[in-house]
Amino acid sequence: MIRRALLALALLSPAPALADTLLDNVDGISVNRDGKVTRFAGLVFDDEGRITRVLKFGDKPPKVDYREDGHGHVVIPGLIDAHAHVMSLGLSLLTLDLSDTRSLAEAQAKIAAYAAEHPDRPWIIGRGWNQETWGLGRFPTAAELDAAVPDRPVWLERVDGHAGWANSVALKEAGVTAKTADPVGGRIVRLPSSKAPAGVLVDAATALIDTLVPPPRPEDRDLALVKAQQLLVSKGVTAVADMGTSAEDWMTFRRAGDEGRLRIRIMSYASDVPTMQLIAGPGPTVWLYGDRLRMNGLKLYLDGALGSRGAWLKAPYADDPGNTGLKLLDGTQLRNLMSRAAIDHFQVAVHAIGDAANAEVLDAIDELSETYDGDRRWRVEHAQIVDPADCARFSAHGTIASMQPVHESSDRLMAEARLGPARLAGAYAWRTMQENGVPLAFGSDAPVEAPDPLEGIAVAISRSDASGEPFGGWHPDETVTREAALAAYTAGAAYAGFAEGRFGQLDVGERADFLVLDRDPLLSTPDHIRATKILQTWIGGIRVFGDATTAPEESRRSKR
C-alpha cells in the first residue's frame, strides 16, 4: 500500500528540471549565413546540450546548477567541415602516409622502411603521394615502386584519391597487362611508346586493383573512427559532411553511436544509390544520437581530379593537348541517378571539378528543377574550375557551392600548368560565387587536405599559403571577408546539410557546439589565424578536447 502511494505521488510530481550550465566571462562570437556577426558574453545550455539563453554584455548571470568560467577567452561556434571522408581520414592514420614526402627518392625510402616494419602484411597500402610536389613532371612507375618493395603487392592512392600507384606484383595479381583496355571513366597510364601498364591507374581504372585489396576488419574501422575523431576535434571540427559513405562506414558510425563513442556530428551522403536505399530506405533518416548522425542523400562523381588530369574540361589541358579529362557519367546516367535520389527527397551532391563537369551538372539541375520543386539544396562539390559565365547559374536554384579553400593554395601552380593563365578567371572563385548570391560551404576534402578550418579561413581571406606565397595573394580579387569565411565553415556548412537550427550557430535552441580560442579570428591576420590555439572543443555541452578534458560524465563544471 505504501509502495502504491509513493508511486502515485511520483507520477503526480513534476519531472525534475534539467540541470543548466552557464558559460560566462567570454568574448563570444556567432555568425549567420550572411556573415552577420553577433557578439555575446555568455551561454546557458541544458543537460541535452541545447542552448537555452544567450547573454549579452551587461546581462545579469542567471542562477544555474553549474558554471564554467571562460577566463575572457574568445568563443566561436564549432567549425564544420562541409566536405570530408571520415573513414578514409581515419584509415589513412593507420596506414602508410606519403603526404609529407617531397621527392620520389624520399617516398621510396619511406615505403621500403614501412614494408620492413610490417613484414606480416600481405599488401602494403597507403596514400598521399603527389608527383607535382616531387617535381617529377610525370607519374611514378611500377619499376620505381618495385625498387622499394619487390616481393608483395603495393597499392598507394594519390593525394587526391583519383589515381593509384601499383608495383609489378599488384599489377600481375590484378591481371593488368598491355591487353587490358581502359575502363569507361578510367585510364591505365602506359609506358612510353608501349601499351604496357606503367604503374598508375586513374579514376575508374583503380577498381581493377581496389577489389583485390583486403578490406579493413570491423575493429580496424572502429579504431580508424577513433583516430579520425581525435584529429578532427583537435582542429576544432565538431561536424562534417561525409561524402561517399559506404554501408560499412555507416555501420561503423552506428556502432560508435550505440556505444556512446560518436563525438562529432556526421551528415552522410551515400556512395551510390543501392547504399542510400539500404541505409535510409524511402527517404533521409531521422537525426540519430542527439543530432550526431543522419543520412542526408547521395554523392555522385561526374569527373576526376585536376592533378591526375581527370577533371573534365571544355578545352584540352594546356600541358596535355588532346586530353579533356574523364567524364565518369554521361548526361543520361547523371540525370537518372540524380532523379532517383530526388524523387525520395534525398539531397544530391555532385563532384564536379572541371568547367565542363560544372556546366553539365548545372544543366542537369536546371532540367530536374522543373520536376523536383521545393527546397532541394542541390550541391556541387568542389566547383573548382568554373567557366565565369556559369558562376551566376549556381544561384538560379539555390545550388550550393561546396568548396575547399586550401585546394587553391595547394594546387595553384598545378592549375596554372594544367590550364594556362587565360583560363583561370573562374578558378576557386569564392568571391564571384558569393557576389552572385551562391550559398557557400567550406571544407577540406580530408584526407586530401588536412582537416584544418583555421588554415582554410586564412587562405580564404588571403589567397596565400602558410609561407605567404604568392605575395599579395593568387588572384586576390577572389578573397572573401573574415566574416564570410567563418560563416562558410559554420552556419553555411550547416545549411548545406539541412542542419540549420540544430547546430552551426550559437543561438537559442541550437546545440552547444563551440570552441574556446586564444584570439579573435575576425581581428587577426592570416598568420595569426594559423597560429590560433584551440584551447577547448565542446560538442553538445560536453568538453571533448582541451585542458582538463576528462570522460564525458566527469567533465561537468564545478557546481555553484
Image (cartoon, rainbow, N blue to C red):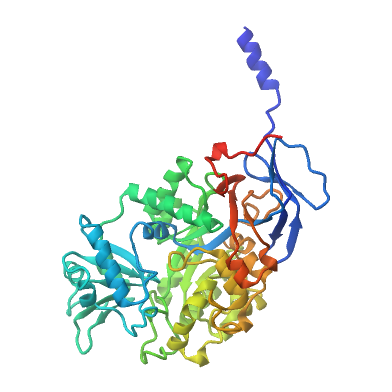
- Image position, residue 361 (x, y; %): 49, 75
Picture residue at 41% right of the left edge, 61% below the top: 271
Is residue 374 at all visible to an observer of this figure? yes
Nearer the observer, 23 or 215: 23
Picture residue at 42% right of the left edge, 53% below the top: 227
Q: Give the quadrant of residue 180.
A: bottom left
Position of the C terminus, as image quadrant, is top right
- Image position, residue 452 (x, y; %): 52, 64
Picture residue at 55% right of the left edge, 68% below the top: 455
Position of the N terminus, as image quadrant, is top right
Above-or-below relation of 376 to 179? above
Nearer the observer, 400 or 414: 414
Please identify the residue farthest to the top as the structure is shown: 1
Nearer the observer, 364 or 499: 499
Is residue 34 at all visible to an observer of this figure? no
The count of marks equals 0
Answer with left or right where residue 38 lies relative to residue 353.
right
Answer with left or right where residue 276 lies relative to residue 477.
left
- Image position, residue 187 (x, y; %): 30, 78
Above-or-below relation of 316 to 216? below
Answer with left or right where residue 450 lies relative to residue 185.
right
Q: Give the quadrant of residue 147.
A: bottom left
Above-or-below relation of 407 to 518? below
- Image position, residue 263 (x, y; %): 51, 48
Above-or-below relation of 84 to 233? below
